[in-house]
Image (tube, helix red, strand yellow):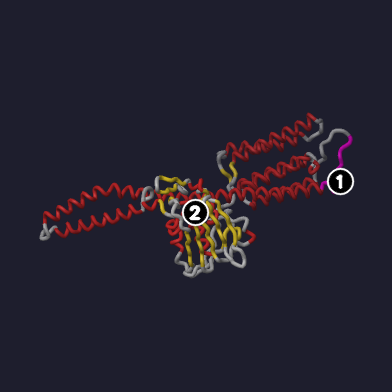
Amino acid sequence: MTTAFVTPPHGRSFGLRLDTLIRLRWLAISGQIAALVVVNLGLGFPLPLTSCLAVVGLSALVNVLLRVKYPVARRLGDAAAGPLLAYDVLQLTALLYLTGGLKNPFVLLYLAPVMISATALAWSTTVMLGILAVACAGAVGLWTRPLPWAGADVPMLPDLYLAGIWVSLSVAVGFIGMHAWRVAEEARELADALAATELVLAREQHLTAIDGLAAAAAHELGTPLSTIALVVKEMHRSIGDNSPYSEDVALLRDQVARCRDILQTLTSLRSGDAPFDRMPLALLLEEVVEPHRNFGITIAVSVKDDPDAPVIARNPGLLYGLGNLVENAVDFAATRVDISAQWTPSGLDIVVADDGPGFSPEISGRIGQPYVTSRARERQDADLEAESGLGLGFFIAKTLLERTGANLTFENRVPPATGAVIGIHWPRKALAIEVDGDATKGRALD
């Protein structure tokens, strides 16, 4: 299977709350004031204290204006949060210019705005902030006031050493920024994929609930409908066939029969105590496979006979997960998909195998992660090649099946055979099998 990473459909920037930025800036202001006080009063180093406090005071003024003008719960997008973080870079540059530039050990604080952007804003905004931080660091390396120092022995750092500090800072901005963005991006992708999984499961459960309501409605309507049928029968007997109303009564009788057929259909959809709420393993697999049989691919289902095998509870997550794996196998199979299942002393094993190209080596360790997609094979009844999906199918199937207690394995057939093999195993304790009298029942996969 040729698989590639694709960009998720949702925007990758969740923005930053204004309150978060304001609090972080207050923290920075407090640290800056503390550093100025310790260096000037504690260590006795001469500082352009007035200019430094003016720069810090400007940040405090910006914070006050933001809190007064805008609601703190407001979430800022890249267009608003980016300039605010850029201001923090420029404010730090002004302080470093007044206090020694690259010779000042606090030059490492250039990493802070870039890190904040990498975790919450778009990659383009983070790159622009990184470039700004590197450029400002280079500027204060070329033009700066002397490093504050007490005594006659003021340290003189070689220009080559200062250039090395700038290069190391540039590398740190790039590497740490990229690493933080990648980690945050994976967390966002996982959150999106889990949300999609919850949506699929909620939809299936909603359909199941509708089936139950339909069955309840059929049960409640059965008694009044029987009464109507009895009254119509008595009316027909009373007026006879020669009455001018006989046709109307016959029509009523036909409509009552039709209503009974509809209610019987609704009852067959019932989920709960209906006969098909629990079914043998072979019947459940047939329900999963049936929608995928008409695409020119042979689907062979093999279930090992076991007279003591428990029945399986119909579960939306189980049906959707298995159905997705079968659909994927059909998409990539050349001619055939084999599905085998058997009960073992340790639990239930189901294997889905196809004769397609199999999993490509570069993604074999990433199967089941969100937003890993494969180009679907053109089905024989389609006029156009199927479009590539969003890369959530395997992830959703794996997540839903693992929620039922299953363990999944993904591998390729042993050469020279080709194709993918997916193994699914449920331990006995996950199936929660119960024996009641002579009948074996399973709360399996509820």
Label 1 residue SS: loop
**Going from the N terminus, do you reach mark 2 or mark 1 first?**
1
Where residue 339 sits in the image (x, y, percent)? Answer: 50, 61
Above or below, 71 against 340 in this view is above
Q: Position of residue 37 (x, y in %)?
A: 75, 31
Quadrant of the image containing the N terminus: bottom right
- Magenta segment: does it hold 380? no
Task: Point out which mark residue 177 bears.
Answer: none
Q: Secondary structure at mark 2?
A: strand
Q: Is residue 155 magenta?
A: yes
The 10 Å Cα crowd at callout 1, few under 14, some 14 to 19, many 20 or more, is: few
* Residue topped by disc 2: 343
> Can you see residue 401?
no
Seen as rendered, the residue at the extreme top is 41
Picture coordinates of residue 355, whole percent (x, y) = 55, 66
The majority secondary structure of the magenta stretch comes to loop
Q: Is residue 241 found left or right of 413 in the rendered image?
A: left
Query: Residue drawn 13% across and 55% down?
Result: 237
Q: Please give the range of residues in magenta.
A: 152-162
Task: Give the number of marks.
Answer: 2
Q: CA distance from mark 2 to mark 1?
A: 75 Å
Would you say 165 lies left or right of 124 here? right
Q: Mark 1 = which residue?
A: 158
Residue 123 visible in rendering: yes
**Residue at the (44%, 57%) spot, across then down:** 282
Discs 2, 1 touching: Cβ within 8 Å? no
